Image (cartoon, grey):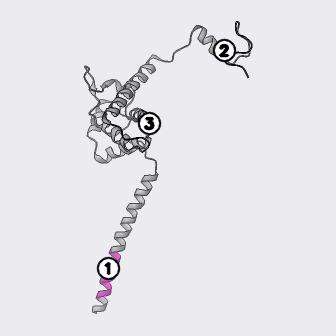
Amino acid sequence: MALKRKEEDRFDRVGAELKRMNGLLQKILKCVQDRHSTPQKPAELPISSLQQMDAFENIDDNGYSNVVNYFQYIGSFHLKEAVNLCLKEALTDAFTRSFTWWGREEGHRPLYNARLTLAIHEAVCRNRHFQKPTRSEFQVQMREALRVAKERHRSRMRGPRTRTGEAARINRDLWSDERIEGEDEETNISGTIND
């Protein structure tokens, strides 16, 4: 009886240890799969309203971590490009009008202390293609990215620019084989030698 009891105890311990090891292996497998998979764009992005921005300020740690991982995945080989890409994914161009870096202008919110900015900072600091930026380097690039996003929105609102006059005629005639008056035989419109 005692021998049988010892064997049962031993089997129970082995079974418990196998369960623990199996659980550990499952966790390791999940980590490996997550590391090699492409993160999906979080549902919180892009932010296009003050309500969404306020909701992002109160996002849970898991959601915040997903956003940082997504920004890190976007990455780049240069700080400027990384910040631009992250901000472009984070905020709609139209919504960037609601912000200035310090928020000093009437009706504008500050971006320097937003949780979204912290997420972008954390992501670019993790980038292995360039050195971790200083706070001032990051600030310069964020301010520039914000300016570029606002300009991109203004350009869209203006609509496509149309070429007029000589520039339009040159653009239409660029691939024409007809000679333009005043152009010598050896050069084309742009002044390069023909092949």
Location of residue 102 with respect to 89 vertically, above or below: above
Question: Mark 1 against mark 3, which lies toward the viewer?
Answer: 3
* Residue 133, quarter of the rendered image: top left
Q: Quadrant of the C terminus?
A: top right
Location of residue 110 with respect to 167 vertically, above or below: below
Indicate the secondary structure of the residue bearing disc 3. loop
Front residue of this view, candidates 34 and 72: 72
Residue pictured at 31% horizontal, 48% vertical: 62
Indicate the secondary structure of the residue bearing disc 2. loop
* Place of residue 168 in the rendered image (x, y in percent of width and height, measured from the top left): 60, 12
Q: Which residue is mark 3?
A: 78
Q: Earlier in the sequence, mark 2 or mark 3?
A: 3
Tell me the crowding category of disc 2: few under 14, some 14 to 19, or many 20 or more residues within 10 angstroms, Cα based: some
Q: Is residue 42 left or right of residue 50?
A: right
* Place of residue 160 in the rendered image (x, y in percent of width and height, measured from the top left): 51, 18
Residue pictured at 37% horizontal, 73% vertical: 18
Q: Amino acid at mark 2?
A: Ile
Looking at the rendered structure, the number of numbered marks drawn on it comes to: 3
* Place of residue 173 in the rendered image (x, y in percent of width and height, measured from the top left): 67, 14
Q: Quadrant of the N terminus?
A: bottom left
Q: What's the magenta region?
A: 5-16
Q: Earlier in the sequence, mark 2 or mark 1?
A: 1
Q: Are marks 2 and 1 in contact (CB under 8 Å)?
A: no
Q: CA distance from mark 1 to mark 3?
A: 56 Å
Q: Amino acid at mark 1?
A: Asp
Tell me the crowding category of disc 3: few under 14, some 14 to 19, or many 20 or more residues within 10 angstroms, Cα based: few
Location of residue 189 with respect to 126 vertically, above or below: above
Q: CA distance from mark 2 to mark 1?
A: 87 Å
Q: Amino acid at mark 3?
A: His
The label shown at residue 12 is: 1
Report the magenta stretch's main SS. Answer: helix
* Place of residue 45 in the rendered image (x, y in percent of width and height, measured from the top left): 38, 37
